[in-house]
Amino acid sequence: MSLIEPTRVGHKKLSGNDGWVFDTGASRHMTGTLNYLSNVVNIDPILMELPDGMFRMAKVQGSLDLSSDIRLSNVLYIRNFQCNLVSIAQLSKELKCFVMFIDELCGIRDHTSSNLIEVDELRGGVYCFNKSATVKV
């Protein structure tokens, strides 16, 4: 699915940096909004293929809090990227959690305690995190 153009009638365009999309195909968390990140550091450049098939270089990464229970680390900043992606692979590895997709819901459970950390919903054909990350100033 392209995040730039709708794939069928009724699906909204997913550009804009107001929410976070859970992406099972993303290898890393990514954002185009540098102000979302804290603990920002320069990194060796990483060439990333974006969902629209374009390639961009990531030279900076940081961390951010999606909620009080979910802190994302090693989030790549990609200039002019119009979306925020949560890599399911990176999320499950870093948080040691289960991510489940059922009908129109996405659930995140702690691996150790099996406590439910978060439930999010299907919107526009993709699973989106309900809250926006806080902009750091």
Image (cartoon, rainbow, N blue to C red):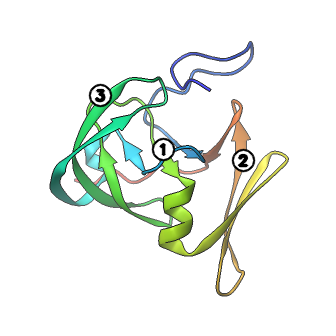
Query: Which is closer to the viewer, label 2 or label 1?
Result: 1
Q: Quadrant of residue 49?
A: top left
Q: Going by the image, does 108 lie left or right of 68? A: right
- Report the amino acid beneath label 3: Asn
Q: Secondary structure at mark 1?
A: strand
Q: Which mark is residue 80?
A: 3
Q: Which mark is residue 121?
A: 2
Is residue 47 depicted above or below 91 in this figure?
above
Is residue 44 depicted above or below 100 in this figure?
above
Q: Residues within 10 Å of mark 2 (few under 14, many from 20)?
A: some
* Quarter of the image with the N terminus in it: top right
Is residue 49 depicted above or below 30 in this figure?
above
Q: Could you say where residue 5 lies in the image, as x and y percent from the top left? A: 56, 16
Q: Secondary structure at mark 2?
A: strand
- Report the amino acid beneath label 2: Glu
Q: Which mark is residue 85?
A: 1
Which residue lies at the image location 50% right of the left edge and 50% below the top edge?
A: 86
Which residue lies at the image location 72% right of the left edge and 81% below the top edge?
A: 114
**Tag 2 near tag 1, CB within 8 Å:** no
Instruction: First in sequence, mark 3 or 2: give its number.
Output: 3
Q: Quadrant of residue 31?
A: top left
